[in-house]
């Protein structure tokens, strides 16, 4: 590798993003045999040769299901190589994302979080998620543990199974006007909302998943409305991430997500993997995550979405032929 992947966090322009995307693409084509085979197949009968690609929208996006059956890596895997694994109850095979550099993931976590929410050390983090020992290979749990380690509040931690302690802790910090960040699975947030705590403007509530069979599935807008009413807050935030990525997009309101500068979402046609839609058309979500430099940065997801003119995107659903994935079935 003749470039420093940590420099992706310094991207500040469309031109710089495009240059980095092309650099990473050519690197991964050379080093990632799974991706190389896929690219060769895509361009076998295509008039554009991959050597002629000049813009990231022309780059082939690897279908996300390859992470279930292949080692999607640009480095050598060893017995003790760390990895993240997706969760679910319907898939016979789960996605596996090998990690060459955990520190790069930590940089993506912190730089992305602080772009949207400011200094992580200032927050009391309340995680309504499984404990690490329950999901030792969860990228979401890894992220939560890392944010917990940065917080100056030693009481930050996992409270999904300790809601009474959680209530007392939050009530104490509400009186102290502490900045509180509550991140949880949807059904855990509903359980939390029944504690009858009225939060304040210094508290952020973020959901990251569905009901997992614990409660009736609800449309996102209805679910958010219920939480806002019960908790006395004006917005519910959301996180868009998955096992196969090392970066997250965030929504502060209305289900509209935004990416950090080294991540980008495109929308492709349903039946043509190389045809990219213009804004405001519904299609399949493609994701560029340059933090995935050691695996594959160009992922064709199974999510259906729409890209807006301000580069925000919304997630509308999932294709009929995709499995239920990842963080949305993280705990059952």
Image (tube, rainbow, N blue to C red):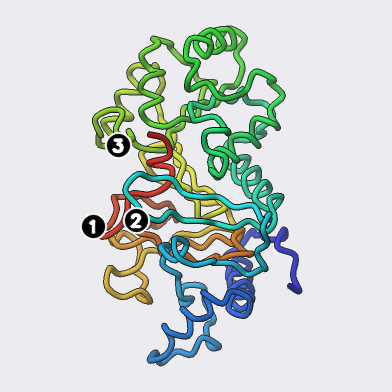
Q: Is residue 283 above or below residue 82?
A: below
Instruction: Find out whether the residues at labels 1 and 2 contact each other: C-beta distance under 8 Å.
Output: no
Q: Give the alpha-carbon distance from disc 1 to disc 2, as whole Å.
A: 10 Å
Q: On residue 320, which mark appears?
A: 1
Pick the front one: 300 or 331 = 331
Pick the front one: 272 or 251 = 272
Which residue is at 68% across, 62% downward? 78
Quadrant in the rendering for residue 87? top left
Residue at numbered disc 2? 303
Instruction: Find out whether the residues at labels 3 and 2 contact each other: C-beta distance under 8 Å.
Output: no
Q: Which x, y percent locates residue 58?
A: 46, 77
Of callouts 3 and 2, the N-terminal one: 3
Q: Is the residue marked by circle 1 packed among few (<14), some (14-19), or many (20+) residues within 10 Å?
A: few
Q: Give the alpha-carbon distance from disc 3 to disc 2, as whole Å.
A: 15 Å
Quadrant in the rendering for residue 142? top right
Residue at numbered disc 3? 220
Q: On residue 126, which mark appears?
A: none
Q: Secondary structure at mark 3?
A: helix
Side of 299 relative to 30 (left or right): left
Of callouts 1 and 2, the N-terminal one: 2
Q: Is residue 325 above or below residue 78?
A: above
Q: Give the alpha-carbon distance from disc 1 to disc 3, as whole Å.
A: 19 Å
Q: Is the residue marked by circle 3 packed among few (<14), some (14-19), or many (20+) residues within 10 Å?
A: some
Side of 95 relative to 302 (left or right): right
Q: Secondary structure at mark 1?
A: loop
Pick the front one: 175 or 299 = 299
Q: Secondary structure at mark 2?
A: strand
Which residue is at 64% across, 52% downward? 82
| Position of the C terminus by quadrant | top left
Viewer-nearest of discs 3 and 2? 2
């Amino acid at each position: 590798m003749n470039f420093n992947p940590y420099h992706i966090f310094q991207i500040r322009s469309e031109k710089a993003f495009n240059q980095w995307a092309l650099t990473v693409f050519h690197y991964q084509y050379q080093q990632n045999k799974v991706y190389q085979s896929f690219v060769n197949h895509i361009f076998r009968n295509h008039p554009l040769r991959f050597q002629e690609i000049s813009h990231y929208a022309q780059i082939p996006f690897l279908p996300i299901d390859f992470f279930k059956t292949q080692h999607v890596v640009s480095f050598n895997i060893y017995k003790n190589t760390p990895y993240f694994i997706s969760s679910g109850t319907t898939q016979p095979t789960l996605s596996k994302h090998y990690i060459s550099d955990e520190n790069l993931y930590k940089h993506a976590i912190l730089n992305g979080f602080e772009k949207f929410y400011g200094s992580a050390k200032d927050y009391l983090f309340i995680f309504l998620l499984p404990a690490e020992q329950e999901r030792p290979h969860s990228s979401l749990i890894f992220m939560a543990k890392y944010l917990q380690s940065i917080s100056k509040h030693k009481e930050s931690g996992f409270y999904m199974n300790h809601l009474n302690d959680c209530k007392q802790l939050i009530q104490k910090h509400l009186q102290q006007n502490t900045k509180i960040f509550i991140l949880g699975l949807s059904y855990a947030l509903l359980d939390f909302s029944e504690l009858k705590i009225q939060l304040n403007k210094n508290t952020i509530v973020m959901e990251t998943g569905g009901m997992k069979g614990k409660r009736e599935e609800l449309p996102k807008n209805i679910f958010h409305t219920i939480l806002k009413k019960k908790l006395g807050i004006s917005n519910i935030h959301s996180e868009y991430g998955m096992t196969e990525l090392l970066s997250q997009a965030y929504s502060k309101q209305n289900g509209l997500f935004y990416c950090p500068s080294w991540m980008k979402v495109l929308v492709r046609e349903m039946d043509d993997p190389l045809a990219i839609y213009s804004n405001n058309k519904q299609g399949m979500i493609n994701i560029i995550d340059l933090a995935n430099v050691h695996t594959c940065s160009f992922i064709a997801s199974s999510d259906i979405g729409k890209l807006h003119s301000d580069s925000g995107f919304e997630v509308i659903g999932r294709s009929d032929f995709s499995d239920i994935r990842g963080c949305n079935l993280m705990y059952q």
